[in-house]
Amino acid sequence: MYLEIITPDKKVFAGEVDAAQFPGANGSFEVLDSHAPLISTMERGRIRVTTKKGQEFFTVDGGVVEVLNNKIIVLAESVIE
């Protein structure tokens, strides 16, 4: 799957991932390969990205995630360092 995490200021992450977990408005959820199409809002929380190199974490201050055809686009309010 291909994942992009974008804020109004910059592109934070772009690349191939094996799995991604998001802080959804109704609880956290995970997206795996060939996931059904989905659009969800996110609360403030942590995104966990699993790649072949391991895991990376990004803390976001809310936003929207879209999953379609093995591409995930995250429009985050901001990424907290």
Image: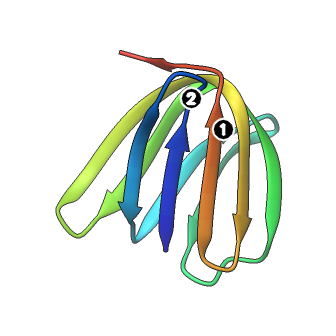
Q: Is residue 46 above or below residue 21?
A: above
Q: Is residue 54 above or below residue 9?
A: below
Q: Residue at x 27, y 51 (%)?
A: 55
- The residue where tag 1 is placed is 75
Q: Percent x, y for residue 62?
A: 68, 24
Inspect the image, locate mark 1, and give the three-letter code of the amino acid beneath it.
Answer: Leu
Inspect the image, locate mark 2, and give the three-letter code of the amino acid beneath it.
Answer: Thr
Left/right placement of residue 74 relative to residue 36 reads left
Q: Residue at x 71, y 31 (%)?
A: 63
Q: Percent x, y for residue 6?
A: 55, 38
Of the pair 68 and 36, the residue shown nearer to us: 68
What is the CA distance from the residue labelled 2 to the residue labelled 1? 6 Å
Looking at this view, name the residue that lies furthest to the left: 53
What mark, if any, has residue 28 been given in the picture?
none
Of the pair 13 and 43, the residue shown nearer to us: 13
What mark, if any, has residue 7 been given in the picture?
2
Of the pair 12 and 56, the residue shown nearer to us: 12
